[in-house]
Structures are given as C-alpha cells and as structure tokens.
Image (cartoon, rainbow, N blue to C red):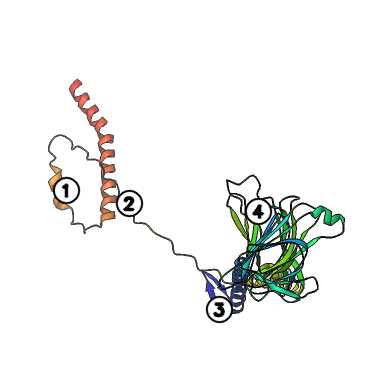
Amino acid sequence: MMRIGRVPVSWPAALLAGAATGLAVLVAAGLGAMLVWPVSTTFNVTVQTERVEFRRPVASPARWVIDDVTLVDGDDEHPGLSGSVEFGAPIRGFIERVAFGDVWGHFECEAPCTSVGRLYDDLDQFVRPLQSVVEIFIADLPARANAGRTVLIPLAGEVVSGRSVGIEVSGTTAVLREGTVSLLDRTAFGNNIFEARRVELSAGDQFQVAEPDPDAPTLGFILADERPALTAAYRVVGRRGTVVRPGGGSYTISASALGRLFGDDLFRAISAVLAVLGTFATIAAVIVALAQMAQAPAPPPAPPVTSPAPDAPRAPDVPAAPGPSAAAPAIAASSPTRPARTGGESAAAATGEAANEAGDSQGTSPAASGADDKGDHS
C-alpha cells in the first residue's frame, strides 16, 4: 500500500497508472520525432515549363535521337544532322523553348571533362567525339507535329525545372508555367506505394530536389510538340524538395516517417488496438484508485485550536466618598490576608469589586442626601 498525497493506493493500481502514463509519453515523443524527421521519398514531377536545367555527374547510357537538327560543335555548324548523341560526364546544360519558338539545347563540360559526348549517325555508327561546348537547335515544331513527329529528349542526373525570376527580368524570359509535384512513398510494413503529398507549382516557380539520392539516378524525358513550351516528366529520389517563388522566397517540401506509417493499413490497425488498450488501462487505473479512496478510513479529526483569553479591560477608578472613615482601619486590620491571585482571577475580582463599589455608591448616595436635607429643614 502506498499513498498519493493523503490517499492510499495499492501497488497494482499505481503500476498500472504509471505504465499508461509512460506509454502515452513514449507515443507522443515518437510521433513528434517522426513528424519533423524527413525520409527519402520519390518526387514525381510533371511540369509545363520553358526551361529545364540539368547536371550529369555520371554518364548515362541513354542517347538523344536527333532528326534534322542543327548542331554547333565548337566553331563548327552542322545543319540538317540526324543520328544520336551519347552524353558523357560530368556535364551540365539546359533545354529551352519559349512559347512556340525553336528548341535550344546547350551542353558544356565540367572539369575534368574534355568532351560533351559522342556523335553517332542514323545507322548507329560512331562519327566523332564532340567538343567541350555543344549547342543543338530544332526548328519547325508545329510542322513536325503535323507530320506526326515530336522531339523527345532524355533526362538524367540532377534536374531543375523552371528558372529563378527576380525583380528585374528581360522582355523574353523562359519560366515555368505550371506543374505538379507528387510525393510517392512506400508504406512501413506493407511495402505498397501511396501518395503522401501533392504540391501545385505556379507560374514563375522553380523546383529542385536539394538532396538527391546518388544511388537512385533521376530518369525522365522532355517532350516538345505542337503545344507551347516544353513538357517535362521525371522522378527524383531524395529527402527534400525546394520550391523557389518569384522574387526569391522559397519553401521546402518533404515526406515524414509519420506519413509513411499513417499510410500503412497494418500500422493503422495496430494503432487502433493500442489506443483501445491504453484507454481501457487508464479507465481501470482510475476505477481502482477511486475504489481505494472509498475504502480508506477517514482521517482522525484535527484537535481544536485554542487561542489565549484576551486580557480583561481595566475597570474605571471610582472616586472615594468625601471625609475620612474611622471604620476603614479597623476593617482593614481585621481582614485576613488573601492568597496571591493569578492574572485572570485578579482581573475578574477587580472588575467585580469595582462594580459593587459603584452600585453601593449609587444606592446610598440618594438616601444620605435625603437625610441631610431633612436635617437642614429641621
């Protein structure tokens, strides 16, 4: 038996209440940590944009099939070229198309790269290595689309959709028009794919994944057809995505372990069972505590608190009768000596004697004055 304050509680009830409280604290702490801790997820990006930037830290086996394009290799220009381009690494560049204009692709090497890639003809025969800077132009997109031909450009590496738009821009600036970013994740136990979050991109936004997974390369494509701008669709695996708003403001999007758990049917079922058990345990602990309170003996009454008696007020002094009294010495001499009194008894006796003397003086004074008056008249 133990006591909580003045209430006796049995050890089983105390242990049950402590276990329920500890479980609630652990669950709250775990949910808080999972809410703020981002996990690796798949960003499924579909945008209509006029500019896509990319960087390839490693070589990709995908080739860009070109058909009737103009290739500028260093200072050499090759119009009407068909075949394919196999890009090397590390390189960076961009693909741009403003409204219904031509497609412009720019590619350049990063150290220690010396060649952007390799050029093949339309029979898949190696032609020559490309230089450190290459540009490709594709014209007449509407005519190609009417003839049933579109331009498909493979995407790999680190991809940035859109362009950062500041306060001052030129008259013609390639920007992102609209798009959607869906965060796809796998459940914690069932290993099923679900959509954890969806973010809409607006005109002028720029999106990129800040921490891409190096073991999961980005794969996708860029499509140029009869529609204005470019259509890009790709997937990036990472922890955080960043959306840069026009003017420089930005925000981060990510998925959490908590969302991964809540997306799992098995976890939801286990959570429901644990919640029910925790509720029953708390109710049982409260009932046991109340029963112990009802059976506990009442505490003994507290002793009364006594306060010291206040000092009696002092009686007013009564003036003595005029004239000497001859009997006073005899009475005083014949009176026996009284024992000493305590403070309370002295105060009470003094009060009583003063009252008697006042009554005697009031009762005898009229008679004496009357007798004196009679004597004077006689």
Which label was assigned to residue 1? 3
Quadrant assignment for the N terminus: bottom right
Q: Nearer the viewer, mark 1 or mark 4?
A: 4
Name the residue that disc number 2 marks: 310
Comes first in the chain, label 3 or label 1: 3
Residue at left offset 74%, top offset 50% = 99
Comes first in the chain, label 1 or label 2: 2
Asked whether the residues under the numbered discs 4 and 2 touch, taking CB atoms below 8 Å apart as contact, a structural biologist would say: no
How far is disc 4 from disc 2 in space, using C-alphas? 88 Å
When the figure is inspected, residue 131 is found, relative to residue 70, above or below; the finding is below
Name the residue that disc number 1 marks: 331
Asked whether the residues under the numbered discs 1 and 4 touch, taking CB atoms below 8 Å apart as contact, a structural biologist would say: no
How far is disc 3 from disc 4 in space, using C-alphas? 67 Å
Closer to the camera, 278 or 74? Answer: 74
For residue 8, side relative to residue 71 (left or right): left
Q: Amino acid at mark 1?
A: Ile
Looking at the rendered structure, the secondary structure element under dot 4 is loop
What crowding class fits label 1: few (fewer than 14 Cα within 10 Å), some (14-19), or many (20 or more)? few
Residue 157 visible in the snapshot: yes
Seen from this angle, which residue lies furthest top?
A: 377
Q: Amino acid at mark 2?
A: Pro
Comes first in the chain, label 4 or label 2: 4
Comes first in the chain, label 3 or label 4: 3
What crowding class fits label 2: few (fewer than 14 Cα within 10 Å), some (14-19), or many (20 or more)? few
Looking at the rendered structure, the secondary structure element under dot 2 is loop
Q: Amino acid at mark 4?
A: Asp
Which quadrant of the structure image shows residue 76?
A: bottom right
What crowding class fits label 3: few (fewer than 14 Cα within 10 Å), some (14-19), or many (20 or more)? few
